[in-house]
């Protein structure tokens, strides 16, 4: 399975947060799964860090890539094909970062690991072949 981590899932995973289910932890750690963190999540974290809404032990542009590499999570760049998905994406979710993650998942055939019910609404309609984690 190819899994795209929603920003909060990545943050919970790297911090050992107990809100993260064992099923998601197992899926992230499974050697036959490829797990991605989007550039969009790094961008979102930098914005929240600058606004004082996301405390981190180091600045996000250093800390987050370091943690991504430490946990062997692949980087997912933002590409034109993903951005083009916005043209046909229904307005079920207003968060621009989450909308772009949905577009990347659609473009690259990824399953999104999230607890966000608005993202799950997209997953039900677009990922009928693959249940969201």
Image (cartoon, rainbow, N blue to C red):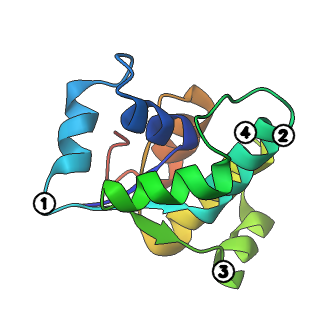
x 21%, y 61%: residue: 33
Category of crowding for the residue at label 1, using alpha-carbon neighbours closer than 10 angstroms: few (below 14), some (14–19), many (at least 20):
few
Residue 70 coordinates in the image, percent (x, y) = 34, 56
Residue 127 coordinates in the image, percent (x, y) = 42, 53
Q: Residue furthest toward the right? A: 51
SS label for mark 2: helix
x 55%, y 50%: residue: 63
The residue carrying mark 3 is 79
x 21%, y 27%: residue: 22
- Sequence-wise, the earlier of marks 1 and 4 is 1
The residue carrying mark 2 is 50
The residue carrying mark 4 is 92
Q: Quadrant of the N terminus?
A: bottom left
Mark 2 and mark 4 residues within 8 Å of each other at the beta carbon: no
- Sequence-wise, the earlier of marks 3 and 1 is 1
Q: CA distance from mark 1 to mark 4?
A: 33 Å
SS label for mark 4: loop
Q: CA distance from mark 2 to mark 4?
A: 27 Å
The residue carrying mark 1 is 31
Residue 133, image quadrant? top left
Q: Nearer the viewer, mark 3 or mark 2?
A: 2
Q: Nearer the viewer, mark 2 or mark 4?
A: 2
- Sequence-wise, the earlier of marks 2 and 4 is 2
Residue 68 coordinates in the image, percent (x, y) = 43, 57
Residue 36, image quadrant? bottom left
């Amino acid at each position: 399975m190819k899994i795209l981590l929603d920003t909060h899932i990545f943050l919970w995973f790297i911090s050992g947060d107990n809100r993260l289910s064992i099923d998601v932890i197992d899926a992230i750690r499974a050697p036959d799964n490829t797990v991605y963190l989007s550039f969009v999540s790094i961008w979102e974290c930098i914005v929240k860090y600058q606004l004082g809404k996301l405390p981190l032990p180091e600045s996000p542009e250093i800390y987050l890539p370091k943690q991504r590499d430490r946990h062997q999570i692949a980087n997912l760049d933002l590409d034109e094909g993903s951005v083009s998905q916005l043209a046909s994406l229904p307005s079920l979710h207003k968060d621009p970062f989450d909308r772009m993650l949905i577009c990347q998942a659609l473009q690259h055939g990824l399953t999104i690991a999230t607890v966000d019910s608005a993202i799950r609404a997209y997953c039900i309609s677009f990922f009928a072949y693959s249940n969201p984690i």
